[in-house]
Image (cartoon, rainbow, N blue to C red):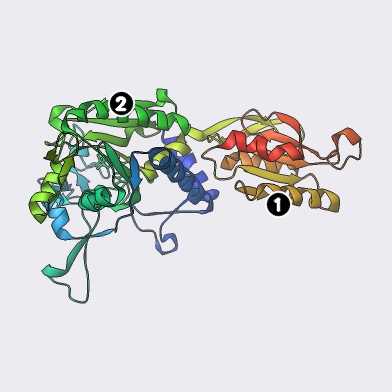
Amino acid sequence: MTAGKIDNQRMEKIVSLCKRRGFIFQSSEIYGGLNGVWDYGPLGVELKRNLKDYWWRVMVHDRDDVVGLDGAILTHPAALKASGHVEGFSDPMVDCRSCKAHLRADQLGEKKQCPICGGKDLTEARQFNLMFETHVGATADEGSIAYLRPETAQSIFVQFKNVLETARKKLPFGIAQIGKAFRNEINPRNFTFRSREFEQMELEYFCRPNEGMQLLEYWKEERLNFYENIGIPRAKLNVLNVPDADRAFYSKGTYDIEYEFPFGLQELEGVAYRTDYDLSQHQKASGKSLEYFDDETKEKFIPHVVEPSAGVDRTVLALICEAYTEDEAPDDKGKMETRTVLRFHPRMAPVKCAIFPLLKNKEPLVAKAKEIVDLLRPHMSIFYDESGAIGRRYRRQDEIGTPFGVTVDFETLGEKDAALRDTVTLRERDSMKQERVAIKDLRDMLLSRIV
Ligand code: ATP
């Protein structure tokens, strides 16, 4: 599946920026790190929230036909037996006898060689179940096993009847969920791309059997629009129509939406028509009816489902990779230098606006800048910075992707030209263009550009 050009150097710069500026840290780093597990720092958590909030807005709040759910992570083993995960949620694993590495057999490539030491002495492939198992309660025996959910979807299926009855929805309608999922990946890699703990944003959109194929197309298009609206252009996405042989046996159609990461073209989201497989399995195993009664036709049947399933962490990584740019900009003395800038869509940017008094030791400038902080703070995430040359301050914000900077200068105080009193310089990150804006217009102008 990996195609496109690989740019390791770019990826290294991105990983280093993420750590340096507080987007993403290795989990338990001071103890040597926990492989495949990551923590989001002060800026990373804002970026992630903006993504999840926007997904929730367009997938749930903006629609009449979708409601939300927040299911538990600890899952009853019977649910995951019924869904097929206990039996079959595994990847083929081989071990390298030379360096003892565990490897995914399906990712070895043509040469069948260990990618770490180059060794060719590999064991036979065996199936490795990716679920994390734990025990609930004081006794750790067979009867107390529970699993950390490997996807958020199953709690939606298991709660289908409760949601149907309480939300009083008619087909077609959806249940959406954002939350953690856990997979004991054999070989976590490519920064956060393949992690052992991650978040998903999933929608299960229930429908009549004859609507499934059409809704699959509909949701693929909706999801492609979503990526454009958060700043990932269509040209960087690839839609893979997953061939019959590679699809789950119950799926009548699956699209993988792939993004051109610096490490290759890789899956961001799967959009799958899963037929009535999941609800049928849970009905069979639980003995409880999960049927839907159609008022119009007076028919009872198990709804079919189309599932757009996206990864939060993978999308955050795509946003950072897409935003990362190096260009040329003048320093404080007008000499051109390389500038690192994250060109986030303003909607996604962790900080929307930075506020700078031109000088920190001029009380009226600082007081005015703080007034602007108070004016904007209830409406957007802001950052106040009074230290260092103004060019340096702009640069620090460029590097974290802040789309707007407001500078309070002597003109704001009306010292040079009374007509400019209570105006500020508004600087735009990408073009570095500056315009003079009245403080009274600032809030609405910014809000219109960041929603
Ligand atoms: P892959 O083939 O890359 O392992 P998958 O096809 O198993 O992914 P799904 O089961 O379809 O993935 O999960 C839906 C989405 O959840 C994926 O498109 C991805 O965005 C996210 N996801 C799955 N596994 C991981 C992981 N280990 N780390 C981060 N995100 C993941």
Camera-side residue of 365 and 303: 303
Which quadrant, please, contains the C terminus?
top right
Say which quarter of the image contains residue 411.
top right
- For mark 2, give the secondary structure: strand
- Dot 2 corresponds to which residue? 239
**Residue at point 12% right, 69% down?**
143
- Looking at the image, tell me whether mark 1 or mark 2 is earlier in sequence order: 2
- Whole-angstrom CA distance, mark 1 to mark 2, is 45 Å
Left or right: 240 in relation to 90: right
**Residue at point 20% right, 63% down?**
146
Residue 184 in view (yes/no): no
Say which quarter of the image contains residue 298.
top left
Left or right: 326 in relation to 146: right
**Residue at point 53% right, 34% down?**
345
- The picture places residue 53, in percent across and down from the top left corner, at 45, 45
Which quadrant, please, contains the N terminus?
top left
Left or right: 20 in relation to 306: right
